């Protein structure tokens, strides 16, 4: 019962993936696991969540992340998926998703991406919809 959430971003380095981790649990809240971006405030951090049970109509995420994509799951048909993003600070990130639905197939992931190096102070990654 697969689901896919896709987002397009621009302004990444030629080898953009920096840090990533994930977790899985039967719980009504789920932390992604901790990462510390090595590129400081110019990195983009994306977190994603999936729930196999459905009923996750309005999941929330901590840590200052902005929700960007959500599809409510349908138990036995397809997973509910959500994504959120934040521009990195120099500190670590370990957001917690709260879908309000316990499932033995709750999964959360997080990854940071390096920005393209430019010669000014406005390095940033931008969501394709911006």
Image (cartoon, helix red, strand yellow):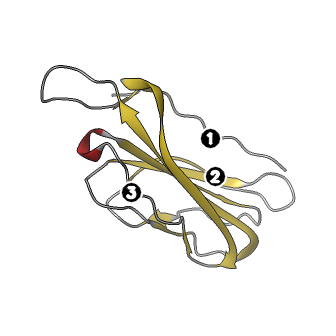
Compared to 98, does 130 lie above or below?
A: above
User: Mark 3 to mark 1: distance in Å?
Assistant: 24 Å
Dot 2 and dot 1 residues touching (CB under 8 Å)? yes
Q: Earlier in the sequence, mark 3 or mark 2?
A: 3
Residue 46 at what x, y percent from top left? 46, 47
Name the residue beneath numbered marker 3: 36
**Which quarter shows the C terminus?**
top left
Q: Earlier in the sequence, mark 2 or mark 1?
A: 1
Is 32 placed left or right of 116 in the picture? right
- Residues 1 and 117: in front is 117
Name the residue beneath numbered marker 2: 81
- Residues 42 and 80: in front is 42
Is any atom of residue 10 visible in this view?
Answer: no
- Label 2 SS: strand
Name the residue beneath numbered marker 1: 5
Write the residue at 74% across / 54% down. 79
Compared to 81, does 59 lie above or below?
A: below
- Label 1 SS: loop
Write the residue at 38% across / 57% down. 36
């Amino acid at each position: 019962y697969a689901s896919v959430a896709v987002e397009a971003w621009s302004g990444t380095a030629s080898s953009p993936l920096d840090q990533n981790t994930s977790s899985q649990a039967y719980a009504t809240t789920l932390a992604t696991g901790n990462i510390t971006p090595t590129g400081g405030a110019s990195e983009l951090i994306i977190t994603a969540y999936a729930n196999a049970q459905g009923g996750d109509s309005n999941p929330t995420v901590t840590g200052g992340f902005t929700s960007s994509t959500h599809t409510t799951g349908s138990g036995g048909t397809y997973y509910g998926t959500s994504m959120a993003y934040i521009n990195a600070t120099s500190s670590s990130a370990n957001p917690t998703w709260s879908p309000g639905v316990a499932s033995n197939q709750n999964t959360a992931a997080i990854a940071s991406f390096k920005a393209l190096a430019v010669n000014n102070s406005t390095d940033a990654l931008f969501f394709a919809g911006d």
